[in-house]
Amino acid sequence: MTLNIEEIEVHIRTYRSLLKSAGEVRILNLIDSHLTMNSILQEKGAGTEVDIAAFIYCLLRLPSPMSNVKKIILGQSYSVFEKNGFGTIEKWQEVAAPGRRRKMHFDGKETLGIYIASVTDVDDVITLATAFQIEWNKFHDKLQDTKNVEQKAIELLDSEDVKRIKNIWGDDYHKFLTAIKFRRVDFTIRLLSGSYNEYTKATQHWWNIVESEHKNLNLQERPIYFVSSNTHSITNLLSRFVLAEEKTLIDFLYRLEDKNLIRLWEGISSGDFLASRENFLYYIAKKYARINQEILKRREKLDRKLGIHYIKASKYLDIDTQVIELSKLAGIDLDNRLSISTKHLNKSKALIVNIDYPLGWAAYQVLTEIGQNVDEIRGIYIMGKAATLTGNVGDILLPTTVFDQHTKNVYAINNVFNPQVFNKIFRTGSVLDMQKTVSVKGTFFENKNIIDYWFKEGYNTIEMESGPYLNSAYEFVYYNRYVENQFINLTNSPFELGIAHYASDTPYSKAKNLGVRNLSYEGVEPTYAISLAIIKMIIERETRYL
């Protein structure tokens, strides 16, 4: 697969070279090369008009103190921060972004410290900060001739964009607009250590904590089913805690007075909307838990009884982990659409290791670390979001070919998931199999010409983790470290391999991305359908060992 992406590679080499030689980079010096990429996420970047879709995309993935930040410090672990004079970082205010899971701390003045898991995090922070600075400063220029910043924002943006920004900033909306008016941003990013060794050590320390938290489980000696998904859907489907909470949750739903959600629920109840009643309750339960923690305590009690163990992210990778004992699931009633029994699981010695899916290249590091420290991996199951060039938001995408931009490898896989698996459990969208997937280096590293090329080559799904995971899986099968620029056949792997994405963006056909719109209930049905499929595959495979 050949493709001229010189503008993108030049931009990546520019900031990586600066970070390696000087240890830091001023975002101002990257703007020209960033704009030359013509990213599909920032198509209006070079003009004077505020690219509000790009700006919102960044707002969702950067923390609210960005209005005060001048310096961004990147480090792989607490020890790296400490060695470089930032030993107080854990005492700084912990901050978060709505659309990007990352450990971040703000010193209350002008410095933001960010834990990074791989080179993908560096790429992501650099491009987000650059796009944010470009659009913030254009917005700043637009607000100079007004005293009423809120009225000016209404004139500059359409009503839906104003609503989205208000949803992100909440009560601080006016304060942020005022900050934009009176301050131009000029970020400097410092990388404390860019060595591969530090990323590896951080991953190793993360796994050591997972093992030490539950020594009695002997993770290193037991068969493992590895799952990369999230930390709620699979465990929810195992405990099914919402079934006993339905009345409480529906009473809460009507108190919310959210017309869209009420309409969804009534459509489900009448049969007019083909979504799952149970899945909807999980969605409402998450909202309810924000105001009533007791429901979480009841769920956690049930989880412990079922052998579901949680290990929170530590001072290393921001990846929560769950370890699930299959033997303790014996006899539980699963969703009857799965048509499987759990009675025989009492004889199982296997564990499910489910992680909150990482970003990009960190996927390689995590799976490699686990593979080097456990005796046997019986299955690898990957669930994630992706952009689709041919489907619709909310569809399920099943690849059999994956092109990895990091290594330029093309992988052929025997995907255990197929449309038949989803016949009874997914009815709100389409299941597209035989997909050809591109695993990209970062969200800003695609422009229209590149996407046109992929489309013509038959590639119809864009995401960030499958390629890195398959580079790791390669090392489980072959005698050497992952190769580059090769076609690799993984169809006869000794472990079961399943990859399923749900479509969150349609950048090619409809020019929609998550900066323009928010994925809400559209993502719930495919997420739970894929999670049910993963549970089904694991139990059926384990049955063959018992």
Image (cartoon, grey):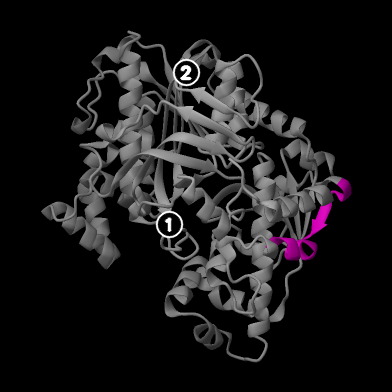
Q: Is residue 535 above or below residue 396?
A: above
Classify mark 1: residues with Cα within 10 Å, few (<14), some (14-19) or many (20+): many
- Number of labelled discs? 2
Distance from Cα at disc 2 to Cα at disc 1:
32 Å
Task: Residue at 47%, 60% (x, y): give it.
Answer: 513
- Which contiguous range is marked in magenta? 21-34
Picture quarter with the C terminus: top left
Q: Label 1, on which residue?
A: 506
Given the current orientation, which residue lies at the most extreme right position?
Answer: 22
Q: Which quadrant of the view contains residue 479? A: top right
Secondary structure mainly formed by the magenta segment: helix
| Residue 103, horizontal then vertical, whole percent | 62, 46
Task: Residue at 35%, 31% (x, y): give it.
Answer: 417
Provide the secondary structure element on which disc 2 rests. loop
Magenta stretch containing residue 306, yes or no? Answer: no
Q: Label 2, on which residue?
A: 493
Task: Residue at 83%, 39% (x, y): give it.
Answer: 83
Q: Is residue 124 left or right of residue 238?
A: right
Say what amino acid the circle numbered 2 marks.
Ser
Q: Which quadrant of the view contains residue 502? A: top left
